[in-house]
Amino acid sequence: MPGRERAMRMSVEQPLWRALAGYRVLTMVYAVGLFAAAHEKFARPWLAVGYFAVLAVWTLATLPKVANAASCTRPFLTADLTIALVGVLLTPLADAPERVDAGGPTLPSIWTAGAVLAFAIKGGWRWAAVASTLVAVANLVERGSPARDTVHNVILVWVASIAIGYVVEVARASERTLARALEIEAATRERERLARDIHDSVLQVLAMVQRRGTVIGGEAAELGRLAGEQEVALRTLVSGGLVPVPRVSGDAAGGAAVRAGAADGDADGNGEAAQDGPVDLRALLAPHAGARVSLAEPGAPVLLAPTAARELAAAVGAALDNVRRHAGERSRAWILVEDEPDAVIVTVRDDGPGIPEGRLAEAEGEGRLGVALSIRGRLRDLGGSAELVSVPGQGTEVELTVPKDGNGTRDVRGKAERR
């Protein structure tokens, strides 16, 4: 999934593998350089030359093996650690005894730490503890006694490798948690999008059928009752699992939201120009104006990306639908469009009775989705916001803010104005 792929790209492991590959090459060169500087002091230099030839070929040939965790297999780790241990144990045979007793470096020198770090990055702190313990035993055997400098070096490698292994384990756990969170977020957004579409179409129609059936009576009343039952069941289904968001009642039926959905379909299916460039928001809001809905807009085009314009118009339709449903058919509403340099702000205000105290919590408990998904959900997906202010007896005001994205909207607008 996209979320998991993004988390993998953010992995902290890959830089560690690259650093390990560079460390192995540099320490191999360092070990060869130490030998070259003191080769005349070795008791059996030909033995050391043979080992360094194997070490150089192995280090360069296995660079792809330390490119990532998948390539670094257990057989490779075992062979790599074996070469390091053999080098340590060969030191007393190749080097002069006095140099060994004086604490001289082993044949692989600090290259051995690279083999241990590979265990740490691949398998975590437990693997690192096993590998570093084997290296410690080999170093003690090479010296013949637990000298102070040997113990110091052994403890340093042991602690460092275990610490790195633990950090890698924590990083992996964090990446898995992040990937899971991204997957849940993507699934939740898709669910909210589907719930918005259902609210703006199916639920609206079912609510309208229920009300009209009750008014007509007879068989239509039974049909309305069934439609009401299906509406309740569908609301429960689409609201289940959603992130709780404060919302007002969204059971407005038949009306502007359905018409807004149809307008969206026209823009998607028939409006080729909407697919090619910014859309004038005024054209999408014009159908909402009427005898009881006043529209105040700028004289110049209010250009937005097609998706943003359609979603903002649908949110306005949902707000007007709530006005008709809760404020009454005789209520008045005003739409104010403001084209700011960085955002487009649309305010929908009505002269209804306002929202009673506690109604928002009650609507949330009933699973109604009007403001939560059809309005706030749309604006949140666009990176904007929806602010609702309601005072009982003084009407309700909804302020919708959509930022202007960087898709060339301003440039196109500038060209239009220059023409």
Image: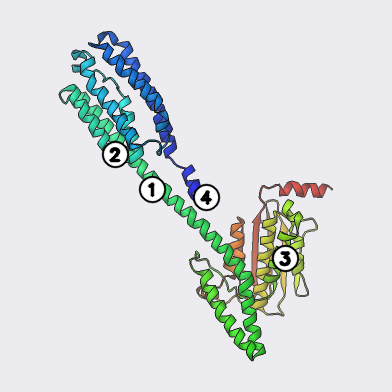
Label 2 vs label 3: CA separation?
62 Å
- Mark 2 Cα-neighbour bin, 10 Å: few <14, some 14–19, many ≥20: many
Query: Residue 269: where, in percent of width, then height?
Result: 72, 60
Q: Nearer the viewer, mark 1 or mark 4?
A: 4
Label 3 vs label 1: CA separation?
47 Å
Give, as a three-letter code, the residue at label 3: Ala
Q: Earlier in the sequence, mark 3 or mark 4?
A: 4
Does dot 4 land on a helix, a strand or a loop? helix
Label 1 vs label 4: CA separation?
18 Å
Q: Identify the residue position indicated by label 4 in the image.
A: 2
Q: Earlier in the sequence, mark 2 or mark 3?
A: 2
Q: Identify the residue position indicated by label 2 in the image.
A: 127
Location of residue 386 (image quadrant): bottom right
Q: Considering only vertical position in the picture, is 392 above or below 418? A: below
Q: Nearer the viewer, residue 81 or 233?
A: 81
Q: Identify the residue position indicated by label 3 in the image.
A: 263
Identity of the residue furthest to the front in this view: 75
Q: Considering only vertical position in the picture, is 147 above or below 270? A: above
Q: Nearer the viewer, residue 28 or 310?
A: 28
Question: Disc 2 vs disc 4: Cβ atoms closer than 8 Å?
Answer: no
Give, as a three-letter code, the residue at label 4: Pro
Give, as a three-letter code, the residue at label 1: Ala
Judge from the rendering whether residue 143 lies leftward or rightward of residue 66; answer left or right. left
Q: Identify the residue position indicated by label 1 in the image.
A: 173
Label 3 vs label 4: CA separation?
31 Å
- The colour mode here is rainbow
Location of residue 82 (image quadrant): top left
Q: Earlier in the sequence, mark 2 or mark 4?
A: 4
